[in-house]
Amino acid sequence: MVITVKLYGTLRRFSRKGTPGIWKGDVPSGSTVLELAAQLGAPEDELAAAAINGETLPLDTVIPENATVMLVTHVNGG
């Protein structure tokens, strides 16, 4: 199934070439947010939160078809 992922913070490095902050592609049906992160190569401990179609949900939520997923990292400061 095809989904769109909006990537924030250090997760932007997993964007598709030419589309900073965006990854659009196929994931297996029934994939969770954590499985999506693994497919992208993003370490689980780098994820702070996820939203699917604008709703903040747990990382073990199954992603529906044609969803827009937002992945956010932890806030760092100094």
Image: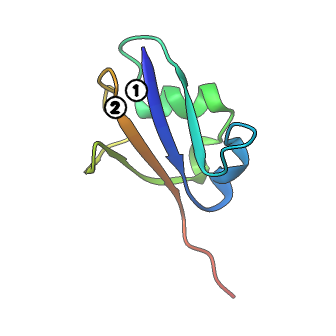
In the picture of the structure, the residue carrying the numbered disc 2 is: 67
Q: Which residue of the protein is positioned furthest toward the left in this rendering?
A: 55
At x 66%, y 44%, the residue is: 19
When the figure is inspected, residue 38 is found, relative to residue 69, above or below; the finding is: above
Q: Position of residue 43 (x, y in %)?
A: 65, 42
Mark before the other along the chain sequence, 1 or 2: 1
At x 44%, y 27%, the residue is: 3
* In this view, the mark in front (1 or 2): 2
Q: Quadrant of the C terminus?
A: bottom right
In the picture of the structure, the residue carrying the numbered disc 1 is: 32
Q: Which residue of the protein is positioned furthest toward the bottom in this rendering?
A: 78
Q: Nearer the viewer, residue 61 or 12?
A: 12
Q: Position of residue 54 (x, y in %)?
A: 27, 50
At x 61%, y 51%, the residue is: 21
Q: Secondary structure at mark 1?
A: loop
Label 1 – label 2 distance at C-alpha: 12 Å
